[in-house]
Amino acid sequence: MKEENFIRRWQIDPKVCDDIIDYFHHNEERHIDGGHVNGKGEWSQDKTRKESRDLGCFMHEVISIPCFDRYEKHLVKCTNEYVEAFPDLLNTCQFGLSEGFNIQHYKKGGGYKIEHFERSNRLDSSLKRALVFMTYLNDVPDGGTGFKYYDHIETAVKGKTIIWPVDWPHTHVGQITKKHEKYILTGWLTFNW
């Protein structure tokens, strides 16, 4: 059966999710308050827009830390299958994981509270983005991701990885839950210009 949109889904071993959450908790000195880039291209930590604790993982860590290496192998498989579904992607430019990724922890009531898409600012890094990836690291029954123009809520199921394009038709927002904490791993596949 052909899917009717550009969001695709895969499942990763839940043990990898547990190991990533453990890594997050054992590296608190690297946590920062989450934020976003506003319309002027400035970093903002406005908790009415996004409320999280984040840990950025750089590319050299992706291959040197076992749980990240296992995750990256999973992401490569997902990306290859995404390209198989949409081969025209390769008509533009090669792309891949070059920025690393972010682990984000949302406490009860936290989350990415505003509708946004991943190329919604003027930073050069934003312009290079091709696809978004996100993996739910724990089950959150009422804490998925709403996609505005698809009128769809992606459920937060532990180990589910989703990939979708970065532009405005994929405007999305986190479901805010007051009952559960939420962990995700997210990042971008960027063009190699």
Image (cartoon, rainbow, N blue to C red):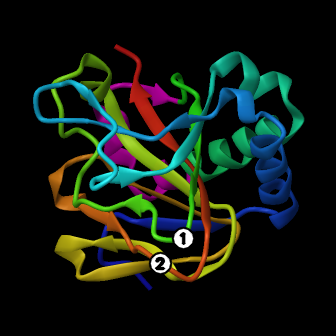
Q: Is residue 190 magenta?
A: no
Q: Nearer the viewer, residue 3 or 58?
A: 58
x and y, in percent, of residue 56 in the image: 59, 30
Amino acid carrying label 1: it is Lys
**Is residue 176 shown above or below 88?**
below
Q: Which mark is residue 90?
A: none
Amino acid carrying label 2: it is Thr
Q: Is residue 90 magenta?
A: yes
Q: Mainly helix, strand or loop, the magenta region?
A: helix
Question: Which range is magenta?
Answer: 81-96
Q: Residue 12 falls in which quadrant of the image?
A: bottom right
Within-10-Å neighbours for mark 1: few <14, some 14–19, many 20+:
some
Image quadrant containing the C terminus: top left
Q: Nearer the viewer, residue 49 or 117?
A: 49
Image quadrant containing the N terminus: bottom left
Between disc 2 and disc 1, whose residue precedes?
1
Label 2 residue SS? loop
CB of mark 2 within 8 Å of CB of mark 1?
yes
Q: CA distance from mark 2 to mark 1?
A: 6 Å
Within-10-Å neighbours for mark 2: few <14, some 14–19, many 20+:
some
Provide the residue designation for mark 1: 108
Left/right of residue 26 with respect to residue 38 in the rendered view = right
Provide the residue designation for mark 2: 177
Left/right of residue 166 with respect to residue 52 in the rendered view = left
Residue occupying image coordinates x 84% and y 29%:
65
Left/right of residue 187 with respect to residue 123 in the rendered view = right
